[in-house]
Image (spheres, rainbow, N blue to C red):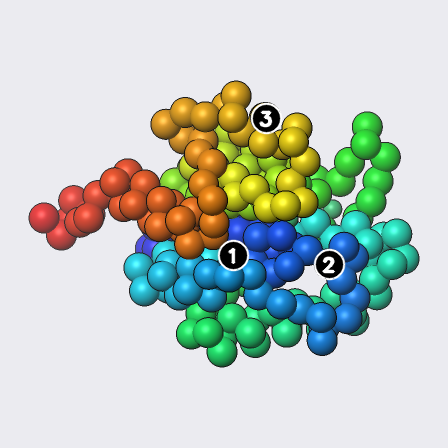
């Protein structure tokens, strides 16, 4: 029998885990944001998988090559590892299409989440969606999960406004990534039976 799907934390990369350098092509310029490694390590300790999901339209725009993207991704993982933190997988959308005909993977589209869920047996409905833009949080509304906006200095006021007007039992806004992960883990724990019925 296939293992039953588990909740995960889907976390944005630029402006959430690493400093947003705008179309970052140079791996030597990757800097973790304060608390990023601790936050991911906390999820690791709770055995909740962390999946990084990132829109990288710079690839389609010709500003970043695929090899540069991969170098930045690997550097991000290495810095997290050095901080005792492990990411299960990273998904990226390389596209940049017409706003009226977007690809399925560019956030807030669900393509990357669905791909991760299928590959790693993740339960999108019980997962948390964390990032510094409203489009990182919006998938919570579509999946039934928990959404947490962590505004950065780069977050447009309109995104903060969207989150503010959606605040509810499922949509939250907190000050930093560590707080976001702590909240997500508490919420996931509260929504998840500690023992499956067969173990009772
Ligand atoms: Mg971001
Ligand atoms: Zn895409």
Q: Which residue is at the far top?
A: 165
**Residue 86: x %, y % from top left:** 46, 69
- Please identify the residue farthest to the right as the structure is shown: 62
Q: According to the image, label 2 marks what residue?
A: 21
**Which residue is rendered at x = 42% and y = 54% of the image?**
178
Closer to us: mark 1 or mark 3? 3
The spot of residue 22 in percent (x, y) is: 76, 55
Residue at x 60% of width, y 35% of height: 134
Give the mark nearest the N terminus, 3 or 2: 2
Q: Which residue is mark 1?
A: 51
Specify which label sits upstream in the sequence, 2 or 1: 2
Which is nearer the N-term, disc 1 or disc 3?
A: 1
Relative to 155, 163 lies left or right: left
Dot 2: element: loop
Q: Does 61 appear above or below 174?
A: below
* Residue annotated with mark 3: 161
């Amino acid at each position: 029998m296939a293992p039953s799907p588990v909740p995960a934390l889907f976390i944005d990369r630029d402006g959430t885990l690493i400093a947003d350098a705008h179309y970052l092509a140079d791996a030597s310029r990757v800097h973790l944001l304060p608390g990023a490694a601790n936050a991911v390590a906390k999820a690791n300790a709770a055995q909740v998988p962390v999946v990084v999901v990132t829109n990288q339209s710079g690839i389609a725009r010709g500003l970043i090559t695929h090899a540069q993207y991969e170098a930045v991704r690997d550097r991000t993982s290495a810095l997290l590892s050095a901080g005792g933190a492990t990411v299960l997988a990273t998904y990226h959308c390389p596209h940049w299409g017409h706003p009226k005909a977007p690809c399925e993977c560019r956030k807030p589209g669900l393509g990357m989440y669905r791909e991760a869920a299928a590959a790693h047996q993740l339960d999108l409905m019980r997962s948390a969606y964390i990032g510094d833009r409203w489009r990182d949080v919006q998938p919570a509304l579509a999946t039934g999960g928990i959404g947490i906006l962590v505004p950065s200095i780069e977050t447009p006021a309109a995104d903060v406004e969207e989150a503010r007007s959606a605040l509810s039992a499922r949509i939250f806004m907190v000050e930093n990534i560590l707080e976001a992960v702590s909240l997500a883990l508490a919420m996931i724990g509260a929504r998840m039976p500690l023992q499956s019925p067969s173990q009772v």
